[in-house]
Amino acid sequence: MHPASSPSGDSGPSSCNSESAGSNAGGSRRSESAATRRRYLELTAGAGFFATVAGCASTTPDGSAAESQQSEPTDRTPDEPETTEDDMGADEDETETDEDDPDAMDDIPLFDAHTHVIPAEARGHDPLFADDLVDWMDTHGVDRAVVLAFDSPEGYPVQAPSWWVLDEVEAYPDRLVPFCSVDPRTLVYGEDTADELLERYIDRGARGFGELKVGMDIDDERLGTLYERCADHDLPILFHTDRQSLTDEVGLPRLESVLASYPEVDFVAHANGWWSHMAADVEPGDLGRIPEGAIESRGRVWELLAEYDNIYGDISTLGGWNALTRDESLGQEFLESHHDRLVFGTDYLFPGQDVPHFDLFARFELDLEAWANIRHRNIERLLR
């Protein structure tokens, strides 16, 4: 079992140390971009997640801000001669220029909504600990990441239970956002079990529920109990649907029933059972594989995103990548029409994993507001 390491000036990377971040990424440009992203969040996120690092204040191991790094006060008294309406307007214009500049897209914060930490070797791959995950994030310019749990045996060859995920990520409160999960079969011990577990995990910092990946129909009544508990605790649910987990039929009628039955729950859809429905011509076998070829007509993903305001798409894994790139003209239209309902994710599972998703930002052309939604705003809005 890998102990969670404490952040320090020598080991754990600091999200507010632009010089260190630039070194990890391999150049001053990444350092400047990271600093700009954090400044952008300070100006736009308000009291959101990144407010804790506004002004790039460094933190001590106990989580308190170092006095020498506190944010500058922004309020000025009326008699300060250097402050004029023109000056204030110039500051606002400068902020807006960052988004108007076509080269500024990389300066928008990047929040990966789907990563993992894995406690042991699995499928021939090394374990993945929080230290490794943060190093990878620094290399690829990822500012923050949701870290999902695997409490069900179907989740992965090696389970990553919620209690361990919470232990592992606690050294990086400014970088890693833990989710928790509960296997619905745990409810055999009583329906109060789910509440007790969720409350315990929430008290320890869990901000969402997932990865929900279990061998049941997506509308199984035992899952209904979990959906209700997540509604009670205001937890978004990130779920995995394919031919083995959270199963459904072609056309996703069971998922639609769940969306209609639990409108107060925000669901984030992931994997082939969802993304195969980018096209209308879906075969049963497509629910467990990655379809190829041009898309002749739009499928249920388009319709469900348009009809229900409690469903989002997680573009992680090769299934999400393929859904956007198999027919790039349709992928472009999809991003343009649904950028307010998509979250960037990678499903990073093991050291050295090849992740093509970072190329999406160069492959498709969206305005900066749309990219900001996909890169960080949508997931921030969903988090408890």
Image (cartoon, helix red, strand yellow):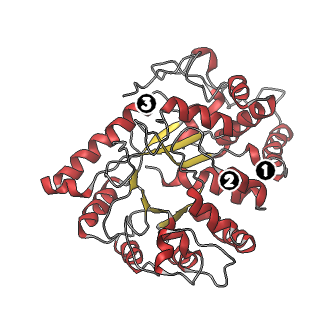
Residue 371 locus on image (x, y percent): 70, 56
Residue 171 locus on image (x, y percent): 46, 27
Numbered mark located on residue 372 in the image: 2
Is 71 placed above or below 210 here? above
Q: Front-most of 135 and 206?
A: 135
* Residue most extreme to the front: 124
Q: Quadrant of the N terminus?
A: top left
Q: Front-most of 105 and 291?
A: 291
Which residue matches tag 1? 99
Q: Front-most of 20 and 310?
A: 20
Cβ atoms under marks 2 and 1 closer than 8 Å: yes
User: How much space separates mark 1 and mark 3, taking CA atoms?
Assistant: 33 Å
Numbered mark located on residue 170 in the image: 3
Residue 70 locus on image (x, y percent): 61, 22
Decide if residue 46 is on the left or right side of residue 88. left
> Which mark sits nearer the N-terminus, 1 or 3?
1
Which residue corresponds to the image point at 54% horizontal and 53% vertical from the top-left? 379
Type of amino acid under label 3: Glu
